[in-house]
Amino acid sequence: MSSRSSPFVTVPFPATRFLAVLLLAPLAPMVAAAANGLAAQDEDTSESYERFVDLVGSKYVPAGPESPRQTLRLQLNLSPDLPEGAKVVLELVHNGLPITGLKSELVVTGRQRLGVEHEWSLSQTLGCDDYRLQVTLDLNEQSEKVRRAFAATTKAFPPRLNPFTYPIFDPGKEIPIGTPEERTAQAERACKLYEAYINELLDNFNEFNDAVKQLRAGEKLHKAGKPDPAAYGVYIREWRRKQGATQRGIRQDLIEKHAAILVKTRTAHVNLIDLSAMVSKRALGLQKEAEKELGLAHVNPVPDPKEKKDADLVHWSASYRYAVTNEALNRSMDTIYRLVCPPAPDTDGDAGAPASGTVTGETESGTEPPGKDPPKGGDAPPKGGDAPPKGGDAPPKGGNGPPKGGDGPPKSGDGPPKGNAQPKKDPGVGISPGSPGDSR
């Protein structure tokens, strides 16, 4: 066999090393910069600062004749490294987040550093609960004289760590807001507010349910013995406007007009938003069922920008992940009531009796939410809230109560739940019987 020369050129070792150095030389500055950066990070991690403001105590003063605003009287210990004239910003934290737009400026004066009293007139009315203090010092916000003084204390205030901020989460250093009387009154207002929204949703649903029954029976929205598509379309638009107004109130008005109540009822508010979407979705299912039975074209009103009455139609939403049943609606209401209206101790032993305002009638089959098995036929569905918390997270401290659970529908044919939902109004109307509707 004839030998064949290798197609690769053999380069002597010294030449190989020379080529490697030649190719890697441009990378040397980058490697050095990266090494310096890592070294700088190591230096940064070695730098730290101690608390320069600590909370000793606080006193809450409710709004009254002397002061139209809620007031906090804080007792603070200041670091001796704080120069005179330094400005420190104080904020209140609730559920781990600072209250937006609520700040107070503490200016260091005199030589006193221990037991310094600071009075804070709150620019917002806060809900009754326990809050935390957050402290921030920004060197860039100080006067020139104070910045020169800080330049002499770089060990206590390393410039690279500016701004200096920290919350005070120590046990026993909560800032309680609200007298016992105010807390009781707030709880009563919250219960009435949520109850009013629940009853409004029930009224909307039962009105639509009545209309669908009468439409099927030929008693409403008919012309010459046949369903009137024009009148039917007008009714669907008007009802969705009404339901949209209720959903707008829940999503927007409750936040803007009742911020103090929302502070303590965030979990209930999330459940109420879901309940409003569940009502819309259940009504949509009844609508599609009637349209299929009567041969009507599906009506899905589109908001008209030129029509002022359609402003609330924009807020109508049936966005809910799971199929909606009467039992799911009752469990959702029950969960909200447990969160904001704790029931009085039961002395009659009839806690299992059906409460007024529950939705009754045949149910719609659907998909149960993950992690929850549907109840067996004939068994009462579980009470709302017995399932694991939504998203698997425990509720934050602050009185929000257990998150909602158990919104998925049970199997078709189960009876209404024997929950403890407590609407004051008895709608007296249930879901119309018939084959399950498509509520998606």
Image (cartoon, grey):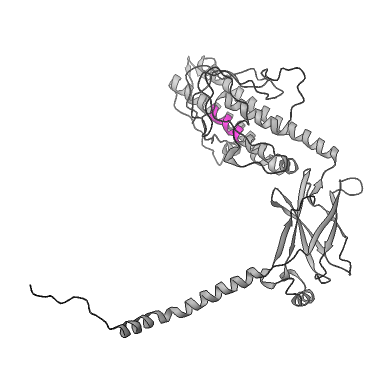
Q: Residue furthest front?
A: 1
Residue 278 lies in magenta, yes or no?
yes
Expressed as whole percent of the image width and height from the top left, the position of residue 297 reads 44, 27
Quarter of the image for residue 271 reads top right
Q: Residue furthest right?
A: 66
Quarter of the image for residue 397 reads top right
* Nearer-the-camera pick, 33 or 400: 33
Quarter of the image for residue 278 reads top right
Q: Residue at x 19, y 75 (%)?
A: 7
Expressed as whole percent of the image width and height from the top left, the position of residue 392 reads 58, 40
Q: Residue at x 76, y 53 (%)?
A: 170
Expressed as whole percent of the image width and height from the top left, the position of residue 83 reads 82, 72
* Nearer-the-camera pick, 211 or 403: 403
Expressed as whole percent of the image width and height from the top left, the position of residue 56 reads 84, 56
Can residue 230 be seen by looking at this rendering? no
* Nearer-the-camera pick, 198 or 82: 82
> If the image is split into quadrants, where does the N terminus sit?
bottom left
Can residue 332 be seen by looking at this rendering? yes
Measured along the vertical axis of the image, is residue 279 above or below residue 162? above
The prevailing secondary structure element of the residues shown in magenta is helix
Instruction: Decide if residue 398 is on the left or right side of residue 326.
Output: right
Instruction: Decide if residue 395 is on the left or right side of residue 175.
Output: left
* Nearer-the-camera pick, 199 or 176: 176
Measured along the vertical axis of the image, is residue 147 above or below residue 87? below
Residue 387 lies in magenta, yes or no?
no
Measured along the vertical axis of the image, is residue 328 above or below residue 61? above
Instruction: Decide if residue 228 is on the left or right side of residue 267.
Output: left
* Stretch in magenta: 274-282
Q: Residue at x 73, y 54 (%)?
A: 101
